[in-house]
Image (cartoon, grey):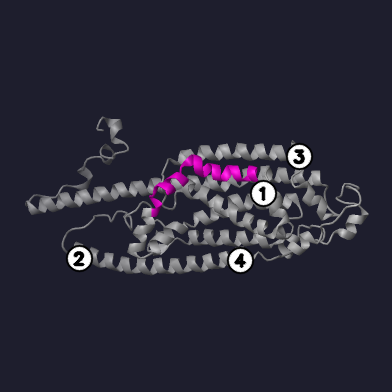
Amino acid sequence: MDAVVHGAAGDLAGGPVGGLVGGPASVLAYSGPPPWRWSDLATSWTAEPLVLTLSVLLAVWYLAAVRRVGRAAGERTGGERAAGERAVAGGGGDRRGGARRVGGWPGAGAGAGGGRWQPTRTAAFLGGLLLWIWCTCSGLGVYDRILFTDRAVQVVLLLMVVPLLLALGAPVSLLVESAPAARRERLLRALRSRPSKVLMFPAVSTALLMAPPWLLYFTPWYEWSVSSGLGNTVLHLALVLLGLAYFWPRLQIDPVGHEYPHLVGLFITFAEVIFDAGLGIVLIYGGHLVAEHHYLALGRPWGPSLAQDQTWGGNAFWVLGDLVGLPFLAALVRRMVVQGREETEAVDAELDARFAAAAARARAAGQPEEEETGMRPWWLDDPNLKHRYGRG
């Protein structure tokens, strides 16, 4: 790709002609890819070695870790089944087998549904890796240093969609659950450390998503990313990492160093919509051409003028930035529902344990067991609700 872009650089004899970039002399100077077509998104390909290597390594690690977790869950299920049979034979144990957390940390075992890692999480993570490859190696990657619009679409996908899919795959939970006990404790200590809590504080993680687009378009970072192969690769990696730093604490599927209500995430999402709209408006109506020198030096004889290209790119960033927020909102609402169900199951499990203990005491004292339906209402003892009834 360096050869494509830098081979196009040269002196231009004249400015834009007929709404296109470059005059007759630029036709001879330009040596980049042919005029862009929609089919190029599927038929034109280039190679981004770092992204390809990382994606393959991450996919291999993820699938191997899922296999280890599934194997360990199978062994654990067999042991719990044997213990349950012994408890039933002895007259003890939970009456209804309430939900349990695995591993001793919030969210542990959440990815294991019935002894398996949830296939939806595997699909989300692998889908994120495939989208990362497509964004950088398909036609979008071929033209990302030629057309401003292409780069704008790529920025949105790499910053907001690829990290969202990767975060939905719960890779940190998988890393912890698949690690040996000693290493698992070290990982959890690192997640509870002060730097982790600072990074995951809502204001900090939000800035890691909202600030990069503004810094990209209004600092030399953008021109470096389109004029240098190294800069282009760094951008492809940095945007995904910054997006992960945002979505990891927002979704709270993985263990986090700083937990906060999901409603905070909803308010932050609305603020992000405003920031995206503001940047789009500045790109469209600001009157400043981003990386003008680079795009003029390309001598592109086809397609829109520089101003038109930036207008299209600003609109694409604005509209796509708002649209891709919808999947995040859906994931956040789903997480709120799942978390509520998990809390309900935890309360049920605690009540089952209390009933089993009361029944054991009654048997030991030679008294009849109390009927479960006559137990104290659970909401009177729930720490989140009992204050409403004057019990707190």
Give neighbour class at mark 2: few <14, some 14-19, many 20+ (Cα, 10 Å).
Answer: few
Mark 2 or 3 closer to N-term? 2
- Is disc 1 in contact with disc 2, using a CB cutoff of under 8 Å? no
Q: Nearer the viewer, mark 4 or mark 3?
A: 3
Disc 1/disc 3 C-alpha distance (Å): 16 Å
Q: Helix or strand or loop: what does disc 4 sit on?
A: helix
Mark 2 or 4 closer to N-term? 4
- Label ID, residue 288: 3
**In this figure, which residue is indicated by the disc labeled 1?**
221
Disc 2/disc 4 C-alpha distance (Å): 51 Å
Disc 1/disc 4 C-alpha distance (Å): 23 Å
Along the line of sight, the residue nearer the viewer: 52 or 2: 2
User: Which percent across, then down, holds residue 65?
Assistant: 44, 66
- Label ID, residue 337: none
Disc 2/disc 3 C-alpha distance (Å): 75 Å
Query: Which image quarter holds the N terminus?
Result: bottom right
Specify the segment rendered in magenta. 190-215
Give the image quarter of residue 228.
bottom right
- Label ID, residue 86: 2
In the image, taking residue 327 as reference, residue 73 lies left or right, namely: left
Amino acid type, mark 2: Arg
> Can the viewer see residue 144 in this picture?
no
**In this figure, which residue is indicated by the disc labeled 4?**
52
